[in-house]
Image (cartoon, rainbow, N blue to C red):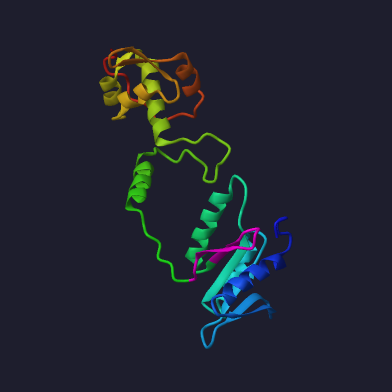
């Protein structure tokens, strides 16, 4: 076990020992089931074993739910930089599917992360409202769903582009003037934070477009037409 697990059957004895300590009679490879346990007249427990998390493991476990509600999946404890995230994500999936999750350490110890049972996810009103605000403020539909290797158009970037476009036409201006002309209420905040390096502070409350801003903002696809500058300052 200390050399790492290379076969699924190396998971069996730790799982068997854990269940037997709870008073179960345990047998391996019963029909199509990896591990089956009985305790008196109680509903049987089934455990499906795999060397890593996979879609097929969850498919197998879901199929076993036609036999019993007490279905677990068991894998070696994940290692590496992504281990914590991997465990967290698969624990959430197990709970969502009503499955139990067990991990086995190299020394043979077992960890039960959750037991089988109904799952009622808690909705986050705060997250929902944040997404709805982003949806409502994002102009048009500038991004391809599923994009992973390109810079995305966000509401913040649209606001920054609107401010940049105004300054290109109007020159140095007060934040209030930029906000009024563009409709970007947080124009001063966007230019002050200068996340993209597109703006330069000229004096208190007055900003102008930087060389970088002039160059980079021009590379973006056409944005909604900006109002004509109203009294550039």
For residue 19, side relative to residue 135 (left or right): right
Residue 129: x and y in percent read: 33, 48
Measured as percent of width and height from the top left, residue 62 is found at 57, 71
- Compared across the picture, whether 193 is left or right of 70 comes to left
Quadrant placement of the C terminus: top left
First to last magenta residue range: 101-116
Q: Is residue 9 rendered to the left or right of residue 193? A: right
- In reply to whether residue 9 is colored magenta, the answer given is no
User: Residue at image x 65%, y 59%?
Assistant: 107
Residue 141 seen from this side? yes
Q: How many marks?
A: 0
| Residue pictured at 30% horizontal, 22% vertical | 178
Q: Is residue 102 magenta?
A: yes
Q: Nearer the viewer, residue 107 or 179?
A: 107
User: Looking at the rendering, which quadrant does residue 24 occupy?
Assistant: bottom right
Q: Is residue 186 left or right of residue 44?
A: left
Above or below, comparing residue 132 to residue 93 in the picture: above
Which picture quadrant has residue 35? bottom right
Is residue 64 visible to the viewer in this orientation of the structure?
no
Q: Where does the image place residue 117, in percent across and percent down from the top left? A: 46, 71
Which residue is drawn at the image coordinates 64% and 64% (left, top)? 56
């Amino acid at each position: 076990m200390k050399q790492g697990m290379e076969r699924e059957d190396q998971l069996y004895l730790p799982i068997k020992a854990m269940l037997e300590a709870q008073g179960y009679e345990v047998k391996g490879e019963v029909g199509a089931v990896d591990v089956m346990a009985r305790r008196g007249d109680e509903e049987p427990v089934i455990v499906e074993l795999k060397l890593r998390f996979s879609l097929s493991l969850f498919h197998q476990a879901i199929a076993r739910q036609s036999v019993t509600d007490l279905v677990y999946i068991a894998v070696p404890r994940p290692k590496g930089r992504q281990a914590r995230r991997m465990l967290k994500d698969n624990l959430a999936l197990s709970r969502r599917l009503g499955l139990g999750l067990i991990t086995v350490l190299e020394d043979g110890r077992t960890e039960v992360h959750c037991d089988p049972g109904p799952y009622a996810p808690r909705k986050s009103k705060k997250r929902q409202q944040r997404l709805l605000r982003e949806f409502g403020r994002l102009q048009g539909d500038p991004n391809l769903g599923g994009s992973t290797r390109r810079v995305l158009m966000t509401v913040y970037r649209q606001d920054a582009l609107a401010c940049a476009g105004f300054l290109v036409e109007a020159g140095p201006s007060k934040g209030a003037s930029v906000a009024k002309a563009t409709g970007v209420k947080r124009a001063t905040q966007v230019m002050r934070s200068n996340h993209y390096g597109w703006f330069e502070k000229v004096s208190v409350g007055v900003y102008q477009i930087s060389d970088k801003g002039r160059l980079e903002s021009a590379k973006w696809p056409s944005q909604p037409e900006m109002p004509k500058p109203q009294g550039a300052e």
